[in-house]
Amino acid sequence: MNIKISKFGYYLPEKIQTSLELSPKIGKSESWILSRTGVSERHISDIDVDKMGAKAVLSMKMNTKPDLIINASGVGKQVLPDTSVFIQKALGWTGIPSFSIHATCLSFMAALVNASGLLNSGFYNKILIVSSERGSKGRNYNQPESASLLGDASACAIVEKDNERKSKINYWWMNTWPEGANLTEVRGGGTARHPHDSITSFDDNLFHMEGPKVYRLARKKVYKLINQILEENNLTRDDIDLVIPHQASGSAVQAYVKYGGFPKEKVIDIIATTGNCVAASIPLAMAIAHKNGQLKRGNKVLIIGTGAGLSAAGLLITF
């Protein structure tokens, strides 16, 4: 599928919360936070996800508007209407079809693959994908590890057909193991824990994660996925120019070096200064890598990660 990401944009809120500043809120020391999460600081937004997404889009300085907007975020502004509608409104646009593709932390990857199909169908020519997350709003301070992981950010990309046929999606694979469904949750906001239900608690609207269990399950799945992608594409680790993982935690990102077998310089690692930005973490890492000159046109790139579910996905692209 010959498509290309022609532009990136991102927004990091000006307000920064260090792990030293966070430590009294969760009753843990700065050193404990750093050892458990690898996060030294995270950005905290005072504006909501729609306006954050709009800021990321405006940073691209586009000459023409897209003909489709896809919101690819883990947590929306509200249940209804769709967050993509509010992003379009915040941009001051109207008349552009908008919807969401939701796959928790893997939402950007899933949106990119779906955008490829829509572009190749001829229905659209220029698709805007926006991932905007305000993870700090969902922090549960009674769960110090997950509360110290989350940060706020938005990132976006313009996806178009590549008429030169140089950039493309080479391979896509995703799978879900629902035995991990209760390991990472926000239980409220739907039909299961409604405000009228007597069992619903305040914590149901906050982020819940059993980090060690998620890490153990995810590591096994991802290691197999790496080998599968390489074998099915007749590649070795040397053939991969860049690995862009979901920034789940410091140990999760470092696992691509320690267990995945990739050189440290090939693995994009931004989590120390951003935290886990949920679905925005992958496009944010891509945008920063592109800005810094690490992600270059023609690179063979492995985008990979896990999300609540538990789901795992791998996307091999020629950038």
Image (cartoon, rainbow, N blue to C red):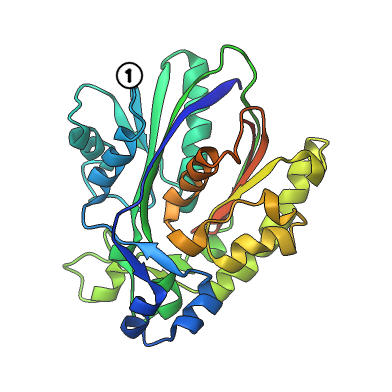
User: x, y (%) of residue 137?
Assistant: 28, 64
Residue at mark 1: 63
In this view of the protein, can residue 219 be seen by the observer?
A: yes
- Residue appearing at x 40%, y 25% in the figure: 127
Label 1: element kind? loop
Q: In which image quadrant can residue 165 be found? A: top right
The quadrant of the picture occupied by the N terminus is top right
**Amino acid at dot 1:** Asn
User: x, y (%) of residue 179?
Assistant: 56, 64
- Residue appearing at x 27%, y 42% in the figure: 83
The quadrant of the picture occupied by the C terminus is top right
Of 178 and 62, nearer the camera is: 62
Is 223 on the left-hand or right-hand side of 285? right
- Residue appearing at x 25%, y 38% in the figure: 87
In this view of the protein, can residue 313 be seen by the observer?
A: no
Of 216 and 166, nearer the camera is: 166
